[in-house]
Structures are given as structure tokens and as C-alpha cells.
Image: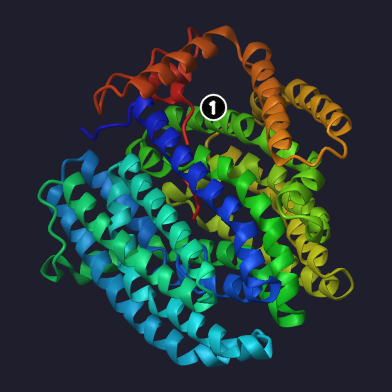
């Protein structure tokens, strides 16, 4: 009988992902003003465009054909069934595939580096440096892509603590190298070399940890097979198109701005995007350990239904207050962080954050559907949203510049919101009234109370100009929200179950410790108490 994931393991993995991602985001936020000051807006815009060639958050992510997601799923299923041969076959096939694709992409990117520099209209003084930066980021795909086979092992076996340790080390190393490079005037070329160095170090760390996570792991090419590749592609092809639209959805704004305007506006977009990413971090954290858990529970509809309702409720409660706070405090945050030159990014940041308030309600359901292979209906909806996004962005980028492309994203998200909800409710057999009662209604009182606290803060901190005080007041407002949500919006039995699960997750019990006792009368949780945890990945 296949093993399922304990509640405390799921929560512990979620907390590890949240801690690692939070620190990584904090590093990025702290280093950004220094980077902009040292490089200037134009060079910083060029560097941002160069990063779109990477796998992590860039267009190269589209080249995996969904195989990384398929690997996570099949490793989780094989581990649950104690099938070591299946793990070896899956991982070896994925590693060989990514090594070949990464090598081909690296050659192509290096060859096209000069053309890319011309396409994005790099300023005359930056043409040579931008060409080399594009070549370095593109060339390091020969390292970065095979790494994804190894990270899939860590995710599939739910070793998220080890995975985040490597990610955090990589972020810290790159931050230190960034400071050294910019202080020694090596510019974006030095940043490119640093990116290559940290990618190489991460590859060796992932190799070691993957073999420690799976005793007997053998990823040599002899274990790869064409039949396994066909199986990976069968599931991965749908995920690939889904992620293709998702990556295009995220990167389209930069591309349209880069081609239709100038690098300076890309830099303004990136400043607003930093605020967006900080708020989105909590959303991605809330689903960051969900895929392998859903894969193991794939045959239990009652458990999946409870995961959807509890997971979405907790995910919204964990992330909505940060998004709300950032919307209200966008002006003070950006001015106190970057300086007066950030004024042009305030409205853009708020549009980014409004988009997140809609997206958070579908993070859990979309991740669960992808983990179960129910990709087609989401894919069709996303294609429609992408079409709307591109059309509106192209129309508005001329008169509104950065705000125009972000309005395209927001309008498309609103258009697709109801169809995505209907898809989830039908798949998991959830009544719409119950969904509203369990997820939407509990957020009303905490959100209203938080907004009141935030506006008091705006009045008190007017003209103070302290990023630290801004952050402290935001944390006060988030604390207000969470206190009201836990005390007034959650029933007492559910509060007790959640508190018990959190204590065991932090205490780090045995990997397969018994799940939390569900609240009395909660039939779905009684069917499989794992759901009492309030689960959670990232669509990457």
C-alpha cells in the first residue's frame, strides 16, 4: 500500500520553503538599491533582460517540456511504492534529456548573444558588455538544466529542507559576489561570471544531496530508457504547454517593454516587480510542498477535497495580508527603499499586487490539478488569458508604458478567474456555497481590520521616511489580520488541530509520524487526517 504524507511533514516542508524563499527574497531586496546605484538604470535593465534567458524564472524554463514536473510526480509515486528501480529509471532519463537540451540551448544562446543585444536596443556604451552577459547567462544552461533533474529528486522525496539550504547558499554567494564585482567595476560581465559560478556550485550540491535522499540512486545513462521518456512526455507535454503559457504570461511584460520602449522602463518595471515578488513569495510558499503530497493521495477524493478547502483557506490567510499591506504602503516602501526615482514605479507595483489578490484564490487548486494530471482545462483557460494579456498590453504600452502592460496582466487575470474556480469545484466535487463560506467569508473581518490599521500607519508615518518603521507597521497590520483570523474566523476544533500540527512540524517528528487528529465532525479529515495540516508548490 502506498504511503501518504503526514500532516507535520507537509507543514515542515512548507515552513522550510517559506524560510528559504523569504531569506532569498530579502537578500534580493537588500542588494537591489546597491546594484541599481552601481550599474545605473540602463545597465540594470540590460542585466534584467539577460536573466530572462535563464531557467530559473526565464524563458529557458519552457525547454523542459514539462519533464521536471513529471519527474517530481513519478519520483513521489515511486517513493511511496518503494520502487527504487522506478526512481532510477525516471531520474536517469530526465538527467540525460536535460543534459542534451541544455547543451544545445547553451550553444544557441551564445551564438545569438550579439543579435539579442541588438534586439533589446542596448545603449551604445553597453553593447559589448550586454553581448557577453547574454552569452554567459545562456551558456550556463549546460549546468543549470541538468540540475533540475536533481532538484526534482529532492522535491519528489520531500527533502525540501535540503533543497532550500542549497538555494539559500546560492543566493548568499551570488549576493557577496555581486558586491565584490560591482565595487571592482566589473559590471554586468562580472555579474554573468558570478551567475555561472554559483550555478556550478549548486549543481554539485544537488548531486550530493539527491544521492543522500535516495539510497541506491543510480543516474548513469544506462538507466535511461526511451519508454520512460515517452511516459514523462505523456504527462509532461500537457504541463509543458501549461507552463509555456505561464512563463509567457510572466515574461511578456518585459519583452513588450524591451522591444517597444527602452531599457530604462524595464528597470522601472523591475523595481515594481521586486515588491510583487516579495508578496508573491508567501503565495508560492503556501503550495510549495503540495505536488508530492497530492501525488501520493491521488486516489482519495475526500482527502483531496479537504486539501483544497483547508489549503486554499490557509493560503489566502497567509498571503492576503502581505499583499494588502503592500498595496496601501507601496508609496512609502518604494520611496524609502529606492529613493525619489522610484516614484514612477508606485502605480505599477500596486497593479502587480492587485493582480495577486485575485491569483491567490487559485494557487492551491491549480497546483493540485497539475499534480493529478488534470491540466487540459486549466491550459485552455490560460491560453485565453494570455491572448487577452497580449492584446491589452500591446494596445496600452504606447500611451501608458509600464502601467499599460500591467493592466493587460490584471485584466486577463480577472477574465480567467471564474472559469478557473469552476474547473476546481467540479474536479473535487465542492459546492460553490461551501467554497465561499470556507474561504471568502473568513477573510472579510480580518482584512477590514488590517486596512484600518494600515491607514492609521500612513497618517502617523507621513514624511518620516524610514523603511524600518514602514516594515514594522506592516508587520503590525499583518499580526492584526492573523490574530483576528485565528480567533474569530477559525472554529475552535480547527484551531486546535492546526496548532497541534504546527507544534509537531517544528518539533520534527518521524518522517511518517501519525497525522493530526481531525476536528470532531469533520468527515473529510477523518477519512484521512493528513488534511488537517492545511497543505501547500510553486508553479515555478
The answer to which of 387 and 130 lies nearer the viewer is: 130
Q: Residue at x 80, y 25 (%)?
A: 453
Give the answer, above or below, for where 73 lies relative to 137: above
The quadrant of the image that shows the N terminus is top left
Q: Return the x and y of residue 126 as percentages of the image width and height.
A: 62, 85
Name the residue beneath numbered marker 1: 310
Q: Return the x and y of residue 483 as percentages of the image width and height.
A: 65, 17
Left or right for 145, reference 521: left
Q: State which quadrant residue 248 falls in.
A: bottom right
Give the answer, above or below, for where 70 lies relative to 405: above
Left or right for 242, reference 81: right
The answer to which of 424 and 249 lies nearer the viewer is: 249
Crowdedness near tag 1: few (<14), some (14–19) or many (≥20) residues, C-alpha within 10 Å: many
Q: Return the x and y of residue 525 as percentages of the image width and height.
A: 44, 19
Left or right for 504, reference 384: left
The answer to which of 423 and 3 lies nearer the viewer is: 3
The colour scheme applied to this rendered structure is rainbow
Residue 437 visible in this rendered orientation of the protein: no
Question: How many circles with numbers are drawn on the protein?
Answer: 1
The answer to which of 185 and 448 lies nearer the viewer is: 185
Q: Residue at x 50, y 88 (%)?
A: 113
Residue 89 visible in this rendered orientation of the protein: yes
Give the answer, above or below, for where 235 lies relative to 530: below
Q: State the SS at label 1.
A: helix
Q: Return the x and y of residue 350 as percentages of the image width and height.
A: 78, 50
Amino acid at each position: 500500500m502506498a504511503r501518504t504524507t503526514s500532516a507535520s511533514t507537509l507543514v515542515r516542508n512548507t515552513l522550510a520553503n517559506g524560510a528559504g524563499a523569504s531569506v532569498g527574497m530579502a537578500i534580493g531586496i537588500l542588494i537591489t538599491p546597491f546594484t541599481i546605484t552601481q550599474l545605473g538604470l540602463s545597465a540594470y535593465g540590460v542585466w534584467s533582460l539577460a536573466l530572462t534567458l535563464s531557467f530559473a524564472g526565464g524563458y529557458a524554463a519552457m525547454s523542459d517540456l514539462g519533464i521536471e514536473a513529471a519527474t517530481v510526480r513519478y519520483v513521489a509515486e515511486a517513493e511511496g511504492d518503494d520502487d527504487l528501480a522506478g526512481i532510477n529509471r525516471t531520474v536517469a532519463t530526465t538527467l540525460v534529456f536535460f543534459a542534451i537540451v541544455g547543451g544545445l540551448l547553451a550553444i544557441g544562446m551564445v551564438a545569438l548573444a550579439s543579435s539579442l543585444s541588438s534586439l533589446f536596443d542596448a545603449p551604445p556604451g553597453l553593447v559589448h558588455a550586454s553581448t557577453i552577459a547574454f552569452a554567459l547567462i545562456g551558456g550556463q544552461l549546460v549546468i543549470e538544466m541538468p540540475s533540475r533533474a536533481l532538484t526534482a529528486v529532492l522535491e519528489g522525496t520531500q527533502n525540501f529542507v535540503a533543497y532550500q539550504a542549497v538555494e539559500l547558499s546560492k543566493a548568499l554567494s551570488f549576493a557577496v559576489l555581486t558586491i565584490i564585482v560591482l565595487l571592482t567595476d566589473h559590471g554586468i560581465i562580472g555579474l554573468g561570471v558570478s551567475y555561472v559560478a554559483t550555478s556550478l556550485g549548486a549543481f554539485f550540491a544537488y548531486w550530493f544531496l539527491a544521492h543522500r535522499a535516495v539510497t541506491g540512486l543510480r543516474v548513469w545513462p544506462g538507466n535511461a530508457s526511451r519508454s520512460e521518456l515517452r511516459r514523462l512526455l505523456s504527462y509532461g507535454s500537457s504541463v509543458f504547454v501549461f507552463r509555456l503559457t505561464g512563463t509567457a504570461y510572466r515574461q511578456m511584460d518585459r519583452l513588450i517593454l524591451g522591444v517597444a520602449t527602452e531599457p530604462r522602463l524595464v528597470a522601472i518595471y523591475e523595481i515594481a516587480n521586486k515588491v510583487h515578488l516579495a508578496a508573491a513569495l508567501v503565495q508560492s510558499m503556501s503550495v510549495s510542498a503540495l505536488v508530492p503530497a497530492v501525488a501520493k493521495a491521488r486516489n482519495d477524493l475526500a482527502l483531496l477535497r479537504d486539501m483544497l478547502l483547508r489549503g486554499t483557506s490557509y493560503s489566502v490567510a497567509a498571503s492576503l495580508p502581505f499583499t494588502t499591506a503592500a498595496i496601501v504602503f507601496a508609496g512609502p516602501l518604494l520611496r524609502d527603499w529606492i529613493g525619489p526615482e522610484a516614484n514612477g514605479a508606485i502605480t505599477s507595483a500596486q497593479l502587480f499586487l492587485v493582480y495577486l489578490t485575485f491569483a491567490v484564490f487559485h494557487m492551491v487548486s491549480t497546483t493540485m490539478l497539475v499534480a493529478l494530471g488534470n491540466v487540459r482545462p486549466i491550459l485552455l483557460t490560460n491560453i485565453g488569458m494570455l491572448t487577452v494579456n497580449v492584446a491589452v498590453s500591446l494596445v496600452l504600452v504606447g500611451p501608458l508604458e509600464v502601467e499599460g502592460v500591467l493592466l493587460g496582466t490584471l485584466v486577463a487575470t480577472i477574465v480567467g478567474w471564474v472559469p478557473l474556480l469552476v474547473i476546481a469545484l467540479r474536479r473535487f466535487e465542492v459546492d460553490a456555497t461551501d467554497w465561499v463560506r470556507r474561504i471568502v467569508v473568513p477573510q472579510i473581518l480580518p482584512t477590514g481590520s488590517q486596512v484600518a490599521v494600515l491607514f492609521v500607519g500612513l497618517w502617523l508615518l507621513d514624511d518620516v521616511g524610514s523603511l524600518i518603521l514602514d516594515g514594522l507597521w506592516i508587520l503590525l497590520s499583518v499580526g492584526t489580520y492573523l490574530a483576528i483570523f485565528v480567533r474569530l474566523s477559525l472554529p475552535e476544533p480547527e484551531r486546535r488541530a492546526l496548532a497541534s500540527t504546527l507544534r509537531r512540524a517544528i518539533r520534527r517528528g518521524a518522517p511518517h509520524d501519525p497525522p493530526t487528529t481531525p476536528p470532531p465532525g469533520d468527515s473529510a479529515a477523518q477519512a484521512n487526517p493528513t488534511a488537517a495540516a492545511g497543505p501547500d508548490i510553486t508553479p515555478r
